[in-house]
């Protein structure tokens, strides 16, 4: 049995731990051969594929990034109405020529979509969700998310000293285009006073009131955590827009920070390493059992899998009845 | 409505976040009064109780330890066959005199037992599980566990450089008297080669073989993670015993580290802060709904509660079918 | 003997440790009384002053920010050609009325200037340098600098995984308006390939060449560390400007990160705590010896002091013969 | 010009950064060839030597341990009164056969001694001090020390929550056989109340008094930081001995922690990375200038060098007039 493995889309802490989980289980337990496909689906187009053995896996558990490289190549994407006929065909040819019995695709929503199409095209595919944004549908949590939340929370912790020393409002923008999971979890863990998510409409007057109310309670400073994907005016970045509006509404000196790429880099947390290891190992089990066309998923405490066809094209968003929002509101936190 | 709140047993990251969660929800949302009981159940014996208001809660979210102090006082413990008649009576009197409508007890297995007895004695009790060991029955995870695993994993990460630079076996002992949860999770996250838990009997020859096998694969060093509660001979500490046995079996230079108290101190992880906040808020909800005699619990992704009478006296142990053990074995990790 | 103590200018890790060092030495060893002046020099204008005792100092050693608050109040600043006559007079009156025998001023370059003027006006002043930028003249190092470098280095470490996984150029902007100390030290410690400081003119073509040269050596990614104060065109922020220019020059996908306020917040490093403690203690010694009008300074390994009149108005800048630049160039790092 | 480079003695954060500094400067700037000698001086005995090129240096800056491996081989050590005649001769032969023009030795006191003897034997030697203990004579600071102090300080920070929650005395033992540098710096940075060094005799009654005095001031808990090398009775480890004595003297519940090997592992701090880089680069400069028989050293803020013959056999110890001790005593810290 020959497995090909690729990583696609944005990088994320825990990818290498997942690769290690897939490969160690495949090599040690099932005696499979494993091949690393470089730069995501582009490696299938360029035939850029190398064998992986146990010695390739040393030091991967806590290493950030991906040793396989990644790209945003979308081989099934239509241009001017038509998919490039060549790309899918080239991929299938590479897979056939290399004798790969199945492909493990590690990636976010875009990757799951491509993986589903590859499966439709007749390839044996097992996929693993990977996103710091935690917005892949079908799994309760994706690895990378806990690491991103940890980095963002650490950053918010640091802003408290400046906010209180200078009696300022500090606005911090964290990642999350469509989904506010990082803002919600880091905002709550970091003691944010106001937390704005793409999923919950906000009223800037209510935000101003919340800041004024804190002043009345003797707290002349506030921490505002915003997801990058909240609606703004005039193409402004989320943090800049909210900071300007707050300064206008309240007269408080307001400063902004955009956390940026450091959220997706570096060594994964212990939680993410174990989630990545479990998901990687489970992917290999699915292969051994011939269960293809599925995405590995965390459901409660157990690792299961869901049909790729159900996952593709959906997003997992925060809803207002989420426990952290309900509890947060009771504690006086403003969600807009 | 007047709530008393106490923390009992070993300290643990996230206690203060829980206190904050209980109190903010109680004060802001339900308009309850909250009273802090000092040094666990001893505070009910000594009438050492102070009112808490919002200003008491500033800075608690990421503060280690417990602002209420703790003790290992077990007021229902029998001595020479008989419970001290006075202690339960004194506690009830204090609660009555202070006009406390219910008591929130935050603690581990011992605390849950006392809380159950207090409930039997007619007091309105809501309890919250708290243990770095993760061995409280009835909840999937306790806050403090993720923090302890994170600290232990960081320590194991550090040992890798010494192990490989000196071609040594490094044995690290982590907390866990009865339950090996910390050893399992930090051992897997830290890349342990051999992981020993109190729940799984081990054969020292097989451990020696595992180390020799690594040598044959070109890895003349190993990391061994042991829970403090594994069986040893002659009253030796776990790490010392295993290190001596490995040196005897393999001839490898072997060094031991006992991680100790640093596992229970310091700021909680983001994961633990949010779990603590949710559990604290849920406890207040139970009070508001008059649901007493219950322990807050995490079940899958949701916070629920279980009857205290079902929890008391039980332990949640690792079982061999745990996913991390199954996956770990397939990856070649030796569990004894 | 009554000491007043104030903190002024931007907040910085280690201020609270300094306050603790001044006060513990003053109270324990010299039996002095200490008074905390709130919000920098504004506290002298508003008579916002409270006594500090040992219990005020608990937990200060590793606490970020400043318990005294800070402001950018410049009481000697001329407006329309004239100093506000009132402000200096009000401060002197407050000091006299409160019976303060001397004032300890903790702050950056602006603060040192004000402190020098206060000394000229006849007040007994001892000052302590405080700046994450490390640009106060007269001291080899200021506390806060090591903490800021540590945070920035950690961030740069994280960018490496994204840079190599995506084969990108990552540009990170760190603090430093006039002086490039943070960029130099974090750039070298974080493995930056190109490091740009305000003090060293750069040629964007040479930067492009350096990136292309790395590609030729098989490294199709680079890390660029820039100080916020480098010259740009069109009012652009440093990181944005450099990222756009690099993309234009090289065609490489380039991403930018502005690290911002998290560099000045949070708990100080061990190095900064000890430097802060030593500087605080030394300030009290100067007071005990009646040596006023001086700023505490680190010279090599010893804490000494320099006349405030020599410090005020000067900046300590990076020079091209700095060992890290000389060594960095020999190692192939591009400084512009 | 062909350089051989070896690392000897205990591992320490920053060794790989030093190797990188030596090699990058040698290869990029001076066009030298560099050879890595494995497992310290043993590699010269076993002819275990490989060429290093730029690609060998990727990722070294923040990697713990040493890619060259290390050993405690002392080839000039006398056995039964006589040096093994063979060992020095074998080393000289290996160096000659390999055509190595000089040897860079990175190590602690033992290594400096061997390096001095190798130089006496006619080999061109440049050495670099490396020790977490900071006890190599001739340099103000060695890399590895700041990292060890940082880890120890972080651990002490964590003990505070347990100490105050349980009203206990917590004793922590840090590394330092002969020299108390780590105990002094981490004890001061971590807020230790009592700090015991090998260099300062202590009286257990005075320590007990210090703990009782804290109780009188309303602080019923203390943190005690001890170096492993303080004198004890009955062969007990430092922490255990002091904990037992304190419990006997004061009646306080006392707990001990031995920090152990985690102090020497993992990624170096930013400070240590830059010190290592500078020392590595300077070593190559000495070679280029033909200045052999010297050890690189930090003096104040500049990197210089001292004759190896002056270094060998000496130890750099803490003296009572050290600023941190003087200031610490004034602040009320007990040094015994």
Image (spheres, coloured by chain):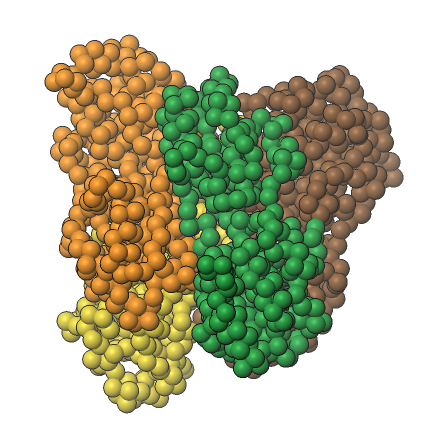
Chain colours: A yellow, B orange, C brown, D green
Observer-nearest residue: B7 or C178? B7
Res A290 quadrant in image: bottom left
Res D17 quadrant in image: bottom right
Q: Residue at x 52, y 73 (%)?
A: D89
In the shown orientation, is residue A204 left or right of residue B118?
right
In this picture, is B160 found above or below B28? below
Observer-nearest residue: D93 or B194? D93
Res B314 quadrant in image: top left
Asked whether residue D211 appears in the rendered view, the answer is: no
Query: Can you give x and y, in whole percent of width and height, for residue C202 in the image?
Result: 72, 69
Q: Residue at x 34, y 33 (%)?
A: B11
Q: Residue at x 54, y 22 (%)?
A: C55
Observer-nearest residue: B12 or D271? D271
In this picture, is A194 found above or below D39? above
Query: Can you give x and y, in whole percent of width and height, for residue D325 in the image?
Result: 61, 34
Pick out the residue farthest to the right.
Answer: C81
Query: Can you give x and y, in whole percent of width and height, for residue A195 in the image?
Result: 44, 45
Observer-nearest residue: B300 or A80? B300
């Amino acid at each position: 049995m020959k497995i090909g493995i690729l990583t696609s889309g944005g990088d994320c802490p825990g990818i290498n731990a997942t690769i290690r989980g897939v490969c160690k289980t495949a090599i040690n337990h099932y005696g499979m051969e494993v091949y690393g496909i470089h730069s995501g689906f582009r490696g299938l187009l360029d035939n850029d594929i190398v064998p992986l053995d146990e010695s390739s896996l040393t030091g991967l558990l806590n290493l950030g990034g991906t040793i396989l490289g990644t790209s945003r190549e979308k081989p099934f994407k239509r241009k001017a109405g038509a998919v490039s006929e060549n790309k899918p065909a080239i991929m299938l040819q590479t897979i056939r020529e290399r004798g790969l019995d199945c492909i493990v695709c590690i990636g976010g929503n875009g990757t799951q979509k491509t993986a589903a199409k590859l499966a439709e095209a007749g390839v044996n595919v097992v996929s693993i969700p990977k996103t710091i944004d935690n917005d892949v549908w079908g799994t309760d949590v994706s690895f990378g998310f806990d690491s991103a939340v940890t980095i963002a929370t650490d950053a918010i912790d640091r802003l408290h000293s400046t906010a209180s020393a200078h009696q300022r409002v500090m606005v911090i923008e964290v990642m999350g285009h469509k989904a506010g999971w990082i803002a919600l979890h880091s905002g709550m863990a970091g003691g944010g006073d106001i937390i704005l998510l793409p999923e919950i409409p906000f009223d800037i007057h209510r935000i101003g009131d919340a800041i004024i109310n804190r002043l009345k309670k003797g707290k002349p400073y506030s921490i505002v955590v915003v997801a990058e994907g909240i609606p703004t005016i005039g193409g402004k970045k989320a943090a800049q827009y909210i900071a300007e509006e707050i300064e206008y509404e309240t007269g408080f000196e307001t400063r902004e920070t955009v956390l940026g790429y450091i959220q997706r880099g570096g060594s994964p947390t212990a939680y993410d390493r174990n989630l990545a290891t479990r998901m990687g190992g489970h992917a290999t089990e699915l292969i051994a059992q011939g269960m293809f066309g599925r995405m590995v998923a965390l459901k409660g405490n157990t690792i299961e899998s869901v049909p790729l066809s159900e996952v593709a094209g959906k997003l997992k968003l925060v809803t207002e009845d989420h426990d952290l929002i309900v509890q947060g509101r009771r504690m006086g936190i403003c969600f807009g």
